[in-house]
Amino acid sequence: MTYEERKEQVKSYLGETVKINIDRPLGYVHKKECYSLTYPLNYGYIPGVLGGDGEELDVYLLGVEYPVKEYECKIIGIVHRHNDVEDKLVAAPMGRSFSKDEIKKAVHFQEQYYDSEIETVK
């Protein structure tokens, strides 16, 4: 997937309603080589949709304060990664919205390791 295709793909989801599967629910501990990372939110993917890394397109789910396995939600933003091969979508329950600053704070646990910027639904 080219850079342009990647950007076009994630932008096409802004404002759309999707069903996501959660593979790292709130509280999930991801053990890395030198440390472990606890997920403060639900994190998953859109089944059957491949992202820039060749794996399913990842989604941060904000506004759901308990672990879930799947969720129907609205895509409210994109985390554009400048130093990686993939971008991340940001979702929220229907009728909920979050500012760029709120999204930035919520995804900082993971995005602190990347040069990224956030785009939201206008």
Image (cartoon, helix red, strand yellow):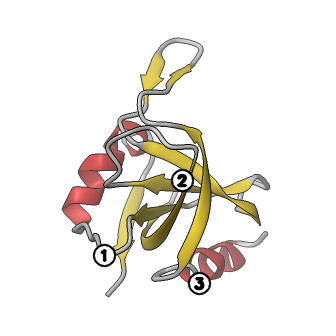
**Residue 43 in the image: x percent, y percent?**
51, 46
**Residue 91 in the image: x percent, y percent?**
44, 64
Q: Are marks 2 and 1 in contact (CB under 8 Å)?
A: no
Q: Are marks 2 and 3 in contact (CB under 8 Å)?
A: no
Q: Is residue 111 left or right of residue 102?
A: right
Residue denoted by label 1: 95
Q: Nearer the N terminus, badge 1 or badge 3?
A: 3
Residue denoted by label 3: 12
Alpha carbon separation for disc pair 1 and 3? 20 Å
**Residue 73 in the image: x percent, y percent?**
47, 67
Amino acid on which the number 2 mark rests in the picture = Asn
Residue lying furthest bottom: 122
Q: Is residue 72 above or below residue 5?
A: above
> How many numbered marks, from 0 up?
3
Q: Residues within 10 Å of mark 1 (few under 14, many from 20)?
A: few
Alpha carbon separation for disc pair 2 and 3? 21 Å
Q: Residue at x 38, y 65 (%)?
A: 93
Judge depth for marks 2 and 1 and give the one in front. Answer: 1
Amino acid on which the number 1 mark rests in the picture = Gly
Q: Element under label 3?
A: loop
Q: Residue at x 59, y 14 (%)?
A: 33
Which quadrant of the figure has residue 11?
bottom right
Judge depth for marks 2 and 3 and give the one in front. Answer: 3
Q: Which mark is residue 83?
A: 2
Q: Residue at x 31, y 75 (%)?
A: 95
Rendered-image quadrant of the C terminus: bottom left
Q: Residues within 10 Å of mark 2 (few under 14, many from 20)?
A: few
Q: Nearer the N terminus, badge 2 or badge 3?
A: 3
Residue lying furthest top: 34
